Amino acid sequence: MIAYEFYIRDPVKGDRLIGILPERRKDSSRITEKSIMHWVESILGRSINGEEVYYIKVRIDEDSGDILKLDQSSFNQN
């Protein structure tokens, strides 16, 4: 299963994991960076600065639960 790990940058404590969103959409044309980041806004509100939040695309092995980071270029670095 594909999922996205969301992190918030914290220069003092280090980056913190704030949530994991499993990708459930079958139509890949609907999957955009904007739609992925909209999830964070819907949970945390629009007060979160987009430059403070980024995500990493991961694959979760459904049998073992192991998480494999897929593409480090999926960092949302503005």
Image (cartoon, grey):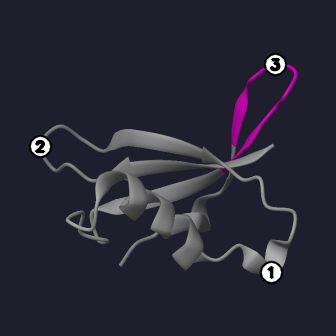
Q: Is residue 61 above or below residue 74?
A: above
Identified at 64% across, 77% down, the residue is 32
Q: Which residue is mark 3?
A: 64
Highlighted range, magenta: 58-68
Residue lying furthest top: 64
Q: Which residue is mark 2?
A: 12
Give the numbered dot on residue 63.
none
Three-letter residue code for mark 1: Ser
Figure quadrant of the N terminus: top right
> Label 1 neighbourhood size at 10 Å, few (<14), some (14-19), many (20+)?
few
Identified at 72% across, 53% down, the residue is 23
Q: Which residue is mark 1?
A: 29
Foreground of the two, 54 or 41: 41
Q: Secondary structure at mark 2?
A: loop
Three-letter residue code for mark 3: Ser
Residue lying furthest left: 12
